[in-house]
Image: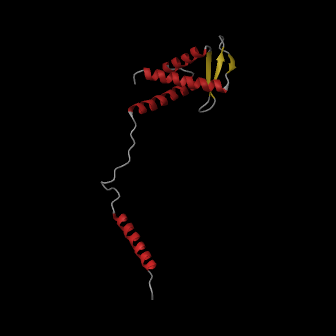
Amino acid sequence: MVISAYQVDNILRVYGDQLRQSIASRRPRSSPDRTPDTVSISASARRKAVIDRIAAGIVERIARDNAQETMEAEAFRDIEKEFGVQLDVTERGPADLIFKVIDEQGETVNQLSIEDSKFLRYKLEEISKEEIEQSPI
């Protein structure tokens, strides 16, 4: 029987692969050589994330509770001053706020467009972020 060099090469390759797999399986999984992956976030990035989360919470409370607390009421008054009219806000969905213009008698005059409402929500979040940054945390 004749054995070619190709067959011997295949046998040696398979044997080497099996040997490597068995050595790798005997290694302890938590060896001291391996270091765990870590993610570090800078203090300023953490602060910005916290401020963004608080500002989003303020906007949600304004929509749900009509600005009862001091920081929410102040932010809402600032947006009314900037827009120049008395406003009311209702929540249409989890991310949608609808702003309405209110007259002196407290009656709704008109509902703002979706684009205007999105702009006012953005401005409200920006005002809230500014107030949070100015207040001591």
Residue at screen point 38% across, 39% down = 40
Locate residue 7, reporting x and y percent.
45, 79
Residue at screen point 56% across, 18% down = 79
Left/right placement of residue 135 relative to residue 105 reads left
Observer-nearest residue: 35 or 6?
A: 6
Left/right placement of residue 100 relative to residue 20 reads right
Locate residue 8, reporting x and y percent.
42, 78
Left/right placement of residue 121 relative to residue 6 reads right
| Residue 120 visible in image | yes
Observer-nearest residue: 71 or 6?
A: 6
Number of marks present in the image shown: 0
Res 107 → quadrant: top right
Q: Is residue 124 above or below residue 38?
A: above
| Residue 98 visible in image | no
Res 89 → quadrant: top right
Locate residue 100, reporting x and y percent.
65, 20
**Residue lying farthest to the bottom in this orientation:** 1
Quarter of the image with the N terminus is bottom left
Q: Is residue 14 above or below residue 84?
A: below
Residue at screen point 43% across, 20% down = 134
Quarter of the image with the C terminus is top left
**Residue lying farthest to the front in this orientation:** 5
Residue at screen point 40% across, 73% down = 15
**Residue lying farthest to the right in this orientation:** 110
The image's colour scheme reads secondary structure
**Residue lying farthest to the left in this orientation:** 32
Locate residue 13, reporting x and y percent.
42, 72
Observer-nearest residue: 104 or 65?
A: 104
Left/right placement of residue 91 relative to residue 58 reads right
